Image: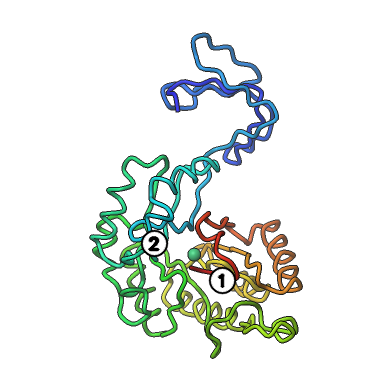
Amino acid sequence: MPKSLLIKNGRIIDPSQSLDAQRDLLISDGHVADISDSIDAPDVELLDAAGLIVAPGFIDLHVHFREPGAEYKETIETGARAAAAGGFTSVCCMPNTSPINDNSSVTSFIIERAKNASVNVFPIGAITRESKGEELAEIGEMKSAGIVAISDDGKPVLDSGVMRRAMEYSIDFDLPVVDHCEDCCGAKNWSMHEGDYSALMGLKGLPGAAEDMHVSRDLLLAEMTGAHIHIAHISTAKSVEMVRLGQSPRSPRHLRGHSPSFHPDRRRRLSQRLRYELQDGSAAQVARRSRCCARRPARRHN
Ligand SMILES: [Zn+2]
């Protein structure tokens, strides 16, 4: 990106200024210098953005870069390039790499590798050692090394006592807890929503209650401890309603609705609920799937 650039004829959308209009935008020395109906700036590189949207950089709170451990799939550098190509300027990378980011040496490795990346890369540390849900990870040391949140994403923390301690620690270290809510209800290796279609297809399903139970537990724990939690990849309308009921200024939510394996009725109810929550401002954030996650079929997580 050149330090000075004139972007002409684009539709500028900037919620921070309540701006949605066609304008010219001048970037000078890496900063926005002017936004006006028409700007002329000789000797500056010109980009005609007619028909395009010009917006502040997006932030992806939930990506799965594959470094360290699976660099043949994706590195921090290539993942960051993919993010930049999609308009994202900052990403938070989940800890389920190999090794898992459950200690400060892995956190430091990621931060070092991200120094020259195309976008800002903010690591998220594991809640528990190896994300096994048993013992807390080195949360304080990871915080000192640079993590911005904790999560055992991809795996639920089933032990309520461990999650309670994690939430208490999260307050001490001023870190949000990104929560993977999936009480397994005795179902393992499921591949779709449990219902008529899973029975018809002979596939093992997971009922919506598996998520709802876990969401309700963690909302209660968050209320008790005062922790700041993000409920990731919500997929049932009931969970969204519970989050809405548990909303407080201290608990913004991370709502993600997706899974091609879920029954169309469940997805429809979810999208209707999400639309409603977004319209009335109750839903705080919607994240996309990272490229790496999106390639994986019929599972919510890798
Ligand atoms: Zn994830």
Q: Helix or strand or loop: what does disc 1 sit on?
A: loop
Q: Quadrant of residue 104?
A: bottom left
Kindly give the residue lying farthest to the top in the view shown: 42
- Quadrant the N terminus occupies: top left
* Residue 172 in the figure: left or right of residue 86: left
Q: Is mark 2 within 8 Å of ligand 1?
A: no
Kindly give the residue lying farthest to the front in the view shown: 72
Q: Residue at x 31, y 43 (%)?
A: 115
Q: Helix or strand or loop: what does disc 2 sit on?
A: loop
Horizontal and vertical percent position of residue 258? 63, 65
User: The residue under label 1 is which amino acid type?
Assistant: Arg
Horizontal and vertical percent position of residue 45? 51, 17
Chain-order first, disc 2 or disc 1:
2
Q: Residue at x 50, y 14 (%)?
A: 44
Front-lying residue, 178 or 291: 291
Horizontal and vertical percent position of residue 98? 34, 65
Task: Specify the label residue 149 is tagged with.
Answer: 2
| Distance CA(mark 2)–CA(mark 1) | 24 Å
Q: Residues within 10 Å of mark 1 (few under 14, many from 20)?
A: some
- Position of 132 relative to 274 (above/below): below
Front-lying residue, 119 or 297: 297
Kindly give the residue lying farthest to the bottom in the view shown: 186
User: The residue under label 2 is which amino acid type?
Assistant: Ala
Q: Residues within 10 Å of mark 2 (few under 14, many from 20)?
A: many
Q: Quadrant of residue 158?
A: bottom left
Q: Residue at x 56, y 71 (%)?
A: 299
* Residue 127 in the figure: left or right of residue 108: right
Residue picked out by circle 1: 299
